[in-house]
Amino acid sequence: MIKMIKRVKKRSKKVGLPPGTLLFTGEKKVEIEKIKVIDFNEKQLEVNEYKEVKRDLFNKDEGMVRWINLDGLSRVDLVENIGKQFDIHPLILEDIMNPVQRPKIEDLNNYFFIVLNMLYLDEETELIQSEQISLILGSTYVITFREQESKIFDSIIKRIETSRGRIRAEKSDYLGYAILDVILDNYFVIQEKIGEKIDLIEEELLENPSSELLGKIHHIEREVITLRRIIRPLREVINSFQREDNPIIHDTTRLYLRDLYDHIIQIIDTFENFRDIITTLHESYLSRINQRMNEIINLLTIISSIFIPLSFLAGFYGMNFIYMPEVRHPMGYPIIIMVMISIAVLMLLYFKKKKWICLKKK
């Protein structure tokens, strides 16, 4: 089962407020907001976790890359404090606090602001979950804002802790790429899940096109439409990201961003194919239902055609006339029964010759 993703989220709380007003308009998904700060370079690593901003997060040791991750957005003071320390524009902070943004990228010279949706599969409930990820990418730091705590970034943290790959030797732009890459990797997981559901629906369509199947087709169709709406803008985001002429993005990282762009194109093409397949499934379902209806009508028509002459004979000899010689004949009843059976058999053979029915077993 796939959880329905809300198409429209309410923003009525923001009506009438001045631009840049910080107000969380989403649903609170964590009990306690957490700030995780990871400082690293090729030789050093330091990990700290806070519930309050009690230190200067902007200043750090030279040559270190700092990754700040905030889980939970309901506390305005935490987001506002981080924004002041890194001189983030109030309108950017407002977008971070409103988890209804369309995926986008903005180049503000000193930093990039990227918004995208994270999709992941809940292992316990097997439901697809969606949440907004906001990312601030500076020359020496990366800040991520999430609606809730999840394991989506655990693989990146493990790579940093174990110095696996080249992430410890690169700058903040490579860390930003790694975050985008792991989010897109989860899109492939969702893509496989949707593909499996479509395959099951296709098998059920061939075997037993029941009325419940139509509901499943409509459900998966709505899901694909919603996921396409989330995924398609990422093409523009990744393309702009790799083409921006900003010193924050190094040439060595651009190659990885081009690979990321290829991935998002592949994902978009796959979901376009899903939409076409679902349309075909819907048409096939209607065709199978019409075919079954035609078969039923054809059977009923044949039965009616056979019983028309039989009903005529039964009605004719059922008339209460004493002068009908056949009525008094001692073999009249068996003869009329044999005549009726012969008529039925001859009509069936005629229908078979005309290929209107098939008497062979499937």
Image (cartoon, helix red, strand yellow):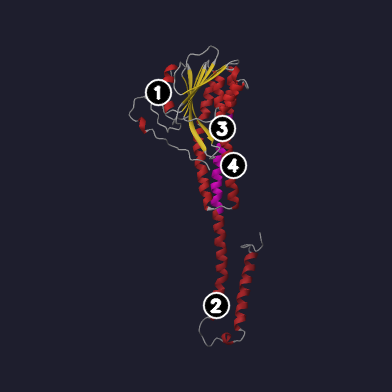
Q: Is residue 280 magenta?
A: yes
Provide residue 172's location: percent of width, then percent of height.
54, 18
The residue that label 4 is drawn on is 196
Q: Which of marks 2 and 4 is nearer the N terminus?
A: 4
Assess disc 3: are there few (<14), some (14-19) or many (≥20) residues with their C-alpha within 10 Å of its C-alpha: some
> Left of 339 or right of it: where is 26?
left
Q: Which of marks 3 and 1 is in front?
A: 1
Q: What element carries label 3?
A: helix
Residue annotated with mark 1: 77
Q: Which residue lies under the disc numbered 2?
A: 314
Q: In this view, does 198 lie to the left or right of 107?
A: right
The amino acid type found where label 2 is placed reads Ala
Residue 158, x across and y down, in percent: 59, 25
Residue contact between numbered discs 4 and 3, judged by CB atoms under 8 Å: no
Q: Is residue 35 rendered to the left or right of residue 306? A: left
Q: Residues within 10 Å of mark 1 (few under 14, many from 20)?
A: few
Q: What element carries label 2?
A: helix
Residue drawn 56% across the image and 30% down it: 184
What residue lies at 57% left-to-right and 67% top-to-bottom?
303
Looking at numbered disc 3 in the image, what kind of residue is underneath it? Asn
- Tag 1, which secondary structure? helix
| Mark identifier at residue 186 | 3
Measure how far apart labels 3 and 2 are at the Cα level. 72 Å
Farthest residue in the top direction?
62
Give the amino acid type for the residue marked by disc 1 in the picture. Answer: Asp
Query: SS at mark 4?
Result: helix
Q: What stretch is highlighted in magenta?
A: 263-288
